[in-house]
Image (cartoon, rainbow, N blue to C red):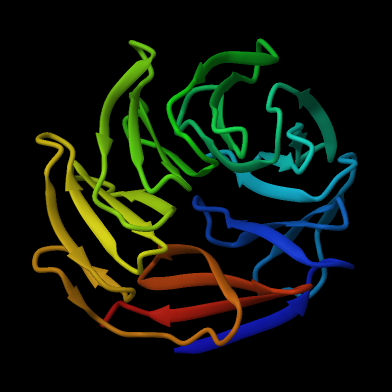
Amino acid sequence: MLATEEFVAHSSSVNCLKIGRKSSRVLVTGGEDHKVNLWAIGKPNSILSLSGHTSGIDSVSFDSSEVLVAAGAASGTIKLWDLEEAKIIRTLTGHRSNCISLDFHPFGEFFASGSLDTNLKIWDIRRKGCIHTYKGHTRGVNAIRFTPDGRWVVSGGEDNTVKLWDLTAGKLMHEFKCHEGQIQCIDFHPHEFLLATGSADKTVKFWDLETFELIGSAGPEVFSWEPIRSHDTVDVGWSRLSDMNVHEGKLLGCSYNQSCVGVWVVDISV
């Protein structure tokens, strides 16, 4: 295990961060100082500091090409920046409370947002507006992920439920109800029809997306699939581990605590 760096990322507390999944070389952070900062992993100074929001940043996300960044604020407003031009290209309103989760569609010009107002919204970047609002969660929507094929979107809530929505039909397809704590993260197997959900109940659950059956549950470690087994455990201290990505045989993790961000690298190629 190697802790590569720790650095001060904002003038006040860091609220959220995301690793660029395409390259695993960039990181975006959102702060209580209303700023969205872009970093090259391994470098202590920010590449860009994006301003425009007038309240704390509660969610950030790169698009799949790492050209756009979306940031959701405590006001519920979402702003979209073009990183090549370092300018705001969209300001989107519609959420009535904090926007706490964001994810871009893997190839379409869409993204999804989740809010403390309990709604999941789909936004069309070109048409500059919300094209669908999914209602069903009874508390805030903490986590959102589009499926790799782009047909569905999955949301995880403070209400302990995971909901799978069909984007074409515009309706709820399935609800997963096995967690005993709020949902904190969601991810898909890149090649198989499997969903992993992580919860405050300290379990990761694995779901078959063809049958919607629960096919495994495990504690808070690093797993391989078939069989479910833990490979290693990394202690990130008091900081909040906020995002992870596997790239070229390495597991990259980013955490934050107060105004600092830590980057951790674990070699998983052996």
Quarter in which the C terminus is drawn: bottom left
State the image quarter where residue 90 is shown.
Answer: top right
Percent across and percent down for residue 165 are: 35, 25
From this view, report whether residue 202 is shown above or below residue 31: below
Side of 115 where 146 appears, left or right = left
Quarter in which the N terminus is drawn: bottom left
Percent across and percent down for residue 223 are: 25, 71
Q: Which residue is more in the foreground, 118 or 83?
A: 118
Residue depicted at 29% across the width and 77% down the height: 269
Residue depicted at 15% across the width and 37% down the height: 212
From this view, report whether residue 186 is shown above or below residue 162: below
From this view, report whether residue 49 is shown above or below residue 111: below
Percent across and percent down for residue 81 are: 77, 36
Side of 266 where 148 appears, left or right = left
Q: Which residue is more in the foreground, 229 or 132?
A: 132
Q: Which residue is more in the foreground, 251 or 216?
A: 216
State the image quarter where residue 151 is shown.
Answer: top left
Q: Which residue is more in the foreground, 48 or 53?
A: 53
Residue depicted at 51% across the width and 40% down the height: 139
From this view, report whether residue 261 is shown above or below residue 16: below
Residue depicted at 70% across the width and 35% down the height: 97
